[in-house]
Image (spheres, helix red, strand yellow):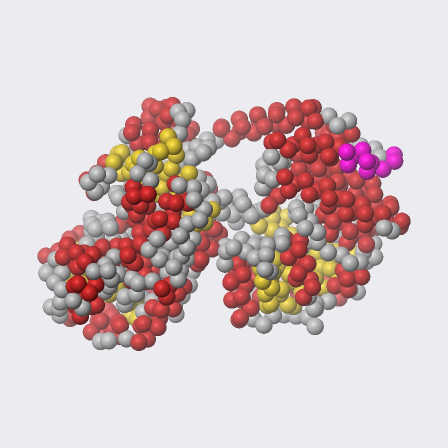
Amino acid sequence: MPRLTLIVPAYKVQGYIRDCLESILQQDYADFEVIGVDDCSPDSSGAVMDEFAARDSRVRVLHLPENTGLGRARNAGMAEATGDYLLFLDSDDTLARGSLAAVAERLEATGDPDILIYDYARTYWDGQAKPSSRKDLLDQSGPASFPLSERPQLLDLLQVAWNKAYRRDFVQQHRLDFPSGFYEDAPWTFCSLIAAERIAVLDRICVHYLQRRSGGNILRTVSRKHFDIFDQYARVFRFIDEHPQRAAWRPAIFKKMADHSITVLDRPGRLPQDARAEFFRLAAVDYRRRKPPGFVRPSGTRGRKYGLLAHDSYPALAGVKAAAKARRLVRKHGHNSVRKFKHTAMGMYYRSQLRMPLDENLAVFSAYWSRGYACNPAAIDAELARLAPHIRRVWAVKPDQAHRAPKGVEVVRVGSHDYWTALARAKYTVNNVNFPDAVVKREGSVHVQTHHGTPLKTMGLDQRKFPASAKGMDFKSLLERCDRWDFSLSSNRFSTSVWERVYPCAFTSLEYGYPRNDVLVNADGAAVRRARRELGLADSTRAILYAPTHRDHEAGFTPRLDLVQLSERLGPDTTLLVRGHYFYEQSPALAELRAHGRVIDVSAKLVVEQLYLASDVLVTDYSSAMFDYANLDRPMVIYADDWAIYSAVRGTYFDLLRQPPGAVAVSQEALTDVLLSDKWNDERAGELRAAFRQRFCEFDDGSAAERVVRRVFLGERAVPPVVPLADRTPAPSPSQLRSTPPHALLGH
């Protein structure tokens, strides 16, 4: 029987649950069990907990058949607990180092109290941590344990379950459990404290209470569920009424009830506007019905609001709220990003366009900082033309890149009047990066963030840990740009969990796959042959695509390989297609290679998917190209001569050398050996590629663009389901084409 049981319910926390569980399992105290409760979460939260259970016997996972809510999920965990004490931890919070040891020591020192209360700190996206406001109530001087009557101020602590350890037999004796609905912590907290004969305190921060920028907290959700507060306090008063000796707590709980009701009314973004008057009337009824004899209202603003409840005077409260709202709007618009260029003529023009109605049939696309027509936005654009031709599609492109747009694509040049008009009026905006800071997200508009790769390197807020790569980044401005996102695309659950954590904003994840990869699954033999002909590749030629990534610590693209020498070693039947990162399109080093017959510089090819189709094998280092290329189920070789430097400077989410998609080489000689032998395409390489595909090609089944268009632009919820990986047929490889008659591959 363990000393402690930690109960961790999980629902839509795939971006946070790993950190939560790691913080528990890395404690220097080991006498505990963890019961993870998957509350029928629609994301990968349950699967992540299963991973931890598979590697640590102290972790058990319950998978609930339907979503029950936080309270009932905790009850399910309690029913399975075997520890002496119950601790609750929300799955987006973490334990501070040494917390469990400190809790266990304090429990022993205070003679196993009914409840031990410990401290917490609020943590924020920018790394700040703020201690709780009532730390003074956890003073350990005085008796080791005591009843609530000796420290009634403990009722003023935050009404949560996760800042306490509860003796399990005490919980069972008093039949304590969590109710369903919002504010489930209120009856649990008040009833347990009132019932406890011996309470102890620990003046130590044990929990890091994450303050999400948006989302995650149901109490910030506009909903009639906030009416649950009346039932929750009714439970507390019934608990008091069951035993006459608890009657002395009625005034204190009454005050908590009144304060809580006023807080719900005061907080913006909780009650629907048409429900506020009804909520106030019910709060006023409870106030008058439960008011104890001789109760004296507090002084000041809070006391005046008590008076409004006592007299059921909602119009007066509404007037106070209207004034407060006006002040908030002034503050908000005072910081609007439009101010950054409002004094310019173009800024004034843009502001004038923002006052015009949205064009419900206008979509603006951009990719790679407006470099041209490419990537996921281009694939969505093409599918939109097929499924919703009534929507006008406009591409924002830099003036010097406008020639890259395919014939028939409507272009607006970045910075022009047409550009600002389109951005101001468009119902839909689609980008694989962020639009400029000055772009305003209008009410009613829809923004799709497609991203442009699966992250191996750290992204978003995780870059703060790597200052060399994050030099000059303004993370506050970054998140303000990300606040404009309505939808975030993902091609695998791994990416989803990263995006939701490193960009803590209120977007909806669409696990639909990357539209740009549709062609890799849907292309036929004719498309592969056409891609090779456009590059001048003979049918008999083995084409190796070399696509290294950008390095933050290098100013330009310097090939890490002697490409001419490599080409000569590989022989006349092999052609190297060299694609520098799009940051380095004008590299002099690559320009010198164009004269060499078997080395072709393809860096200027914006549509990289055609290069994938044309090649026999991909050689890359840490580029996200590997995740897309895996959809072709063709060989890949990782050339990682500077892995130690790259992973230290930029940071990575997994060890690529231990989990590669194929053979690995750390020197040019080793790479040459791999490519001259069978190692690049042997059985071991195939096994590694299969595991990699299973993990990262989860949703790329050839219908990603269709799913996006139907959900985002057509408003359909029932989008085509994802085809299992085993049932997909990628585009045929060049080697298949060499051994198969052309007519046999027309339909794959």
- In the rendered structure, the answer to whether residue 165 lies left or right of residue 289 reads left
Q: Is residue 505 visible?
A: yes
Q: Report the quarter where the C terminus lies.
A: bottom left
Q: Which residues are magenta?
A: 285-294
- Magenta portion: prevailing SS class: helix
Label total for image: 0
Residue at the spot 49% in from the left edge and 28% down from the top edge = 334
Q: Report the quarter where the N terminus lies.
A: bottom right
Name which quarter of the figure residue 598 lies in.
Answer: bottom left
Task: Work out whether 615 lies above or below 421.
Answer: below
Residue at the spot 69% in from the left edge and 34% down from the top edge = 279
Q: Position of residue 635 (x, y in %)?
A: 27, 67
Q: Position of residue 548 (x, y in %)?
A: 27, 59
**In terms of depth relative to the viewer, which is nearer, 224 or 221?**
224
Task: Work out whether 590 lies above or below 566.
Answer: above
Residue at the spot 27% in from the left edge and 66% down from the top edge = 634
Asked whether 302 falls inside the magenta stretch, the response is no
**In terms of depth relative to the viewer, which is nearer, 551 or 25?**
25
- In the rendered structure, the answer to whether residue 38 lies left or right of residue 149 reads left
